[in-house]
Amino acid sequence: MAKKTDSLFREVLEMVNPTEKDLFGIGKSLNSFIGKIENRRKKLRIKASIFVGGSFAKKTLIKKDIYDIDIFIRFDKKYLKQDISGLTKKILRNTKFTTLKGSRNYFRIKAGPRIFFEIVPVMEVKNPREAGNITDLSYSHVNYIKRRIKSDKILDEIKIAKAFCYANRCYGAESYIRGFSGYGLELLIHHYKSFLKFAGAVAKSKDKIVIDIEKRYKNKRSSRTA
């Protein structure tokens, strides 16, 4: 049974892993685009840093017809009371983009026939409690996954989990989907060590599952009341 499962998962990975051509194209487009907006940022003397987030940065990207790649512009605290979406528009001037509504407006740019960049303005925060918006924690999310997950096997298990959820239309944290976020799945597979163990735990559970990866609480009860 185990051999059949391993064989099946290898087949799944062959189907869901982006091709080298896709990854090269995304990387080339990213380098070119980031170089342009970095030059623009410097000319405007805006104090911010630019980083790539999401699945591409964490090496958990799965093959899709359309690739949405997250690029974050992380603004210095001096802009705390300013409209950082407006500042992002200034950086993107002379670039064709679509404005998307969110807790902060962000921007979508077509970078190729199958590649879109989503440009998200965030504030630089060092303490999660300082975050004024959930997207402000994106930098920490990327670094946490890159720091905690070193195994290619776990990265493959994450891709299988994402592909499963994507196929069953429960991949995405948007309210209309009510599914698993990419980051949530990465944490879950990191905890359970495999897609099958994660799926088995969910199937068997008759109550809320409490997971404390960092072991900050003495027991499940104390984590629920914190």
Image: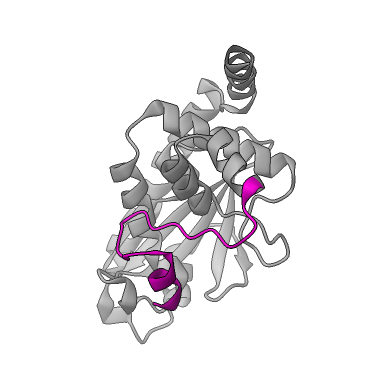
Question: Within the image, what quadrant is residue 127 found in?
Answer: bottom left
Q: Is residue 188 left or right of residue 179?
A: left
Taking the spot 32% from the left edge, 71% from the top edge, the residue there is 128
Give me the residue at 36% from left, 30% from top.
151
Residue 203 appears left or right of 76: right
Q: Is residue 209 visible?
A: yes
Q: Is residue 112 visible?
A: no
44 or 27: which is nearer to us?
Answer: 27
For residue 148, side relative to residue 87 (left or right): left
Where does the image place residue 11, in percent across and percent down from the top left? 63, 17
Q: Position of residue 63 (x, y in %)?
A: 61, 32
Front residue (pair 21, 165): 165
Q: Quadrant of residue 12?
A: top right
Vertically, is 114 above or below 98?
above
Residue 24's spot in the image, x, y percent?
A: 47, 27
Q: Position of residue 21 (x, y in %)?
A: 53, 22
User: Magenta span covers which residues?
Assistant: 204-226
Q: Residue furthest bottom?
A: 81
- Quadrant where the N terminus is found in the figure: top right
Q: Look at the magenta stretch and give its main secondary structure.
A: loop
